[in-house]
Amino acid sequence: MWTSLISAAVLGTCIITLFLLERAFPLRQAKRALAGRLTVNLTFGIIAFATVSLIVRPVAEATLGWTSTNEFGLIRLHMIPDALRPVAAFLLMDLTFYWWHRANHRLPLLWRLHNVHHFDPDLDLSTTFRFHFGELAFSSAFRVVQIGLIGPSLATYLVYEVIFQLGTLFHHSNLRLPIRVERILVRFLVTPRMHGIHHSQVKEETNANYSTVFSFWDRLHRTVRLNVPQEAINIGIPGYAEPQDNRLGNSLLAPFRLQRDYWPREDGHGSRRTNATGKPGQLAP
């Protein structure tokens, strides 16, 4: 109980702080009114919280109980020293989330659900809560595989969950950090500028920067792209860029309808990047 209360207090403080900071120091200019987007995204968040509480969390906790009782999981291999097992489990949790995120972009069934997160026309803290309940329900199956194969301790699992949530809030925020600071942070962590590129309307940029906490997974998998100026990024999905696409009912029903071509603009051509700067691995302002 105390763990849950402390986690909620930490996350709540982070949400309030980031919300105020991104209002004071915005990274990108908003295209749509905040009030309307907040209504949609926070409603998604309420439904997401219910889905996680009723499905995802019980499945994760049951899998944790099974791996603990049966002493099952990669981190229990004798070749891993006891002192390094929490570190190994933490890294494997983050690596597998990289793979899960990438799968959500590559597999058509998962993408039609995850796409709802991406066709938010702006990217800020509220976008953190905009995940379709179908995507979260499917993620419970991933959790069984992830936790079952890794076998983290309850303590490691809880620590990772809190840091995962903090990282997700941070990199979805529209907070403008000094570029020198962010260039240092992005060597290790996913930052707002890095994740902003991931929400670009350019297909090749959306299919990059999949990491959640540690940014080096994208470098290891050669999916990193950092050299796009933030003012050159148009957030969203071209095929779902009309105002009515982001109304609550249409957003919730979108995965269950015939899918449009995601990437063409109004002129019928896909968005392309012509104004990248420097090397792909160097963060642009």
Image (cartoon, grey):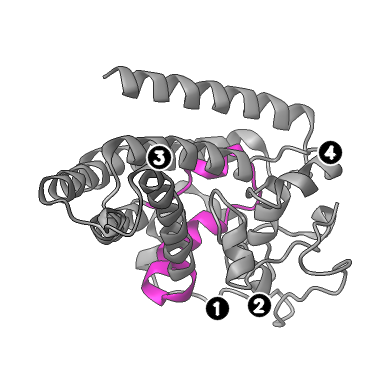
Cα separation between marks 3 and 1? 35 Å
Contact (Cβ within 8 Å) of mark 2 with mark 1: yes
The residue where tag 4 is placed is 178
Q: Earlier in the sequence, mark 4 or mark 3?
A: 3
Give the mark nearer the N terminus: 3 vs 1: 3
Indicate which disc residue 161 carries: 3
Badge 4 vs badge 3, beta-carbon distance below 8 Å? no
Q: CA distance from mark 4 to mark 3?
A: 28 Å
Report crowding for label 3: few under 14, some 14 to 19, many 20 or more residues within 10 A (C-alpha): some
Q: Which residues are magenta?
A: 104-132
Disc 2 + disc 3, Cβ < 8 Å: no
The kind of secondary structure element at disc 2 is: loop
The foreground one among 253 and 193 is: 193
Dot placed on the residue nearer the N-terminal end, 1 or 4: 4
Q: Amino acid at mark 4?
A: Pro
Q: Residue at x 60, y 38 (%)?
A: 125
- Horizontal placement of 203 versus 254: left or right? right
Point out residue 247 in the picture as x, y percentages from the top left corner: 51, 49
Left or right: residue 142 compared with residue 234? left
Mark 4: give few (<14), some (14-19) or many (20+) Cα within 10 Å: few
Q: How far apart, in angstroms, are the residues tagged by discs 2 and 3?
A: 37 Å
The amino acid type found where label 1 is placed reads Asp
Q: Is residue 254 above or below residue 203?
A: above
Q: Nearer the viewer, mark 3 or mark 1?
A: 3
> In terms of sequence position, does the residue under pointer 4 or pointer 2 come before the other?
4
Q: Position of residue 206 (x, y in %)?
A: 62, 66
- Residue that carries the numbered disc 2 in the rendered image: 264
> Horizontal placement of 36 versus 76: left or right?
right
The residue wearing badge 1 is: 261
The quadrant in which residue 225 appears is: bottom right
- The foreground one among 88 and 34 is 88
